[in-house]
Image (tube, grey):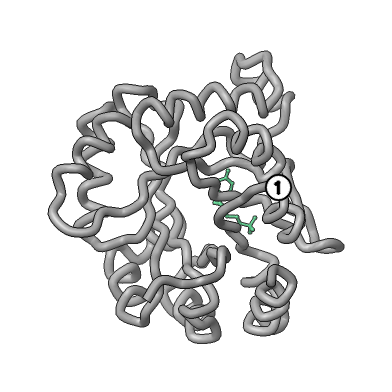
Amino acid sequence: MSCPTPIIVALDFPSREAALDLAARLDPAQCRVKVGKELFTRCGPEIVETLQAQGFEVFLDLKFHDIPNTTAMAVKAAAELGVWMVNVHCSGGLRMMRACRETLDGIAGRRPLLIGVTVLTSMEREDLAGIGLDVEPQQQVLRLAALAEQAGLDGLVCSAQEAPALKAAQPRLQLVTPGIRPAGSAQDDQRRILTPRQALEAGSDYLVIGRPISQAADPARALAALVAELR
Ligand SMILES: O=c1ccn([C@@H]2O[C@H](COP(=O)(O)O)[C@@H](O)[C@H]2O)c(=O)[nH]1
């Protein structure tokens, strides 16, 4: 059964035990989970299989960024692991994204959603200037979104701040938005943020939420409050 809420909880932990401890407090009917670089590098594919066996749909957030063949084969491996969503960096270019899409099209059975990372939500204009891009984040996001659309990707990782412009420019693409901060919670290293409700109203399809849930005194309660806020 597919989860009816838009919430994806980031399991950013240094051990299998810590990740599974949080997962045990969550309900697969209330959220999906995200396995990122830290947890996957520590635990490998087994953690994904365990979470899936517990009923969670898993977003494998490894943000692949490499030459077309290498990236496409990585995405294929993720598909064979049975993940619900996988992502690549749009800045890997059109040929790379196309190779990923074509490889997934050749896979029998249900394929994962293929999502392109645009501009990290931790970045603002001056960070882009630091890597030689003299543009506002939204301008760069829209540029990469057009490439992702051309390559046939299913959606984008972006800030919810860009959702209205993206829904107007690229209405087919699903928007996966980290940088979600309930009112009054710590911004941490995020820069382009919105609250859960603002994000949904702006047009986000999925909200990626990590520390506001994983570092809460009662994560189950924090998740329930978010689900209620979004109803
Ligand atoms: O642009 C991006 C892409 C990915 N992320 C990931 O989302 C979560 C956010 O966690 P918080 O604790 O809610 O900040 C984290 O796993 C990132 O790797 C992102 O934040 N921004």
> Where's residue 161, x and y in %?
71, 41
110 or 9, which lies in front? 110
Residue 43 falls in image quadrant? bottom left
Query: Is 106 drawn above or below residue 181 in the view shown?
Result: above
Q: Which quarter of the rendering shows the C terminus?
A: bottom right
Q: Which amino acid does label 1 sit on?
A: Ala
Total marks drawn? 1
Q: Name the residue under label 1.
A: 202
Give the residue at the far right of this rendering: 184
Q: Label 1, secondary structure: give it.
A: helix
Q: Is residue 24 left or right of residue 195?
A: left
Query: Callout 1: 10 Å neighbours few (<14), some, many (20+)?
Result: some
| Image point (37%, 79%), residue name | 55
> Where's residue 127, x and y in %?
68, 27
Q: In this view, does 3 lie to the left or right of 217?
A: left
| Image point (51%, 82%), residue name | 27
Q: In this view, does 7 lie to the left or right of 14?
A: right
> Where's residue 122, x and y in %?
66, 41
| Image point (58%, 26%), residue name | 142
Some atom of ligand 1 lies within 8 Å of the CB belonging to the residue at label 1: no
26 or 6, which lies in front? 6
| Image point (33%, 74%), residue name | 52
Q: Which quarter of the rendering shows the N terminus?
A: bottom left
Q: In this view, does 198 lie to the left or right of 5?
A: right
152 or 133, which lies in front? 152
Residue 163 falls in image quadrant? top right
> Where's residue 123, x and y in %?
67, 35
Query: Is 151 drawn above or below residue 225 in the view shown?
Result: above
